Image (cartoon, grey):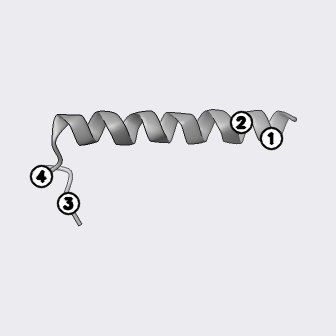
Amino acid sequence: MNTIRDISPGEFTLWLAFFICIVLVWNWSYKG
């Protein structure tokens, strides 16, 4: 497992986008 200090900017952006998508879908499902 990579630590936060070892993660690359590209991976960080990818995980951030993935996390945002999960949150948006979670909120949409919760409201629906």
Q: Is 3 on the left or on the right of 13, as rendered? A: left
Q: Position of residue 12 (x, y in %)?
A: 27, 39
- Residue occupied by mark 3: 2
Callout 1 touching callout 2 (CB < 8 Å):
yes
Q: Which mark is residue 27?
A: 2
- Residues under labels 4 and 2: Cα distance? 31 Å
Q: Quadrant of residue 3?
A: bottom left
> Dot 1: few (<14), some (14–19), or many (≥20) neighbours within 10 Å?
few
Q: For residue 2, what is the image quadrant?
A: bottom left
Picture layout, residue 13 above or below residue 11: above
Residue 29: x, y in percent? 79, 40
Q: Which residue is mark 1?
A: 30
Residue type of the residue flagged with mark 4: Asp
- Please identify the residue farthest to the right as the structure is shown: 32
Amino acid type for the residue under numbered disc 1: Tyr
Rounded to the nearest angstrom, the CA distance separating label 3 from label 4 is 6 Å
Q: Which residue is mark 4?
A: 6
Question: Given contact means CB atoms under 8 Å apart, are the residues at marks 1 and 3 in contact?
Answer: no
The reply to whether dot 3 and dot 4 touch (C-beta < 8 Å) is: yes
- Cβ–Cβ below 8 Å for labels 4 and 1? no
Between discs 4 and 2, the one toward the N terminus: 4
Question: Mark 3 is on which residue type?
Answer: Asn
- In the rendered view of the protein, which quadrant contains the C terminus? top right
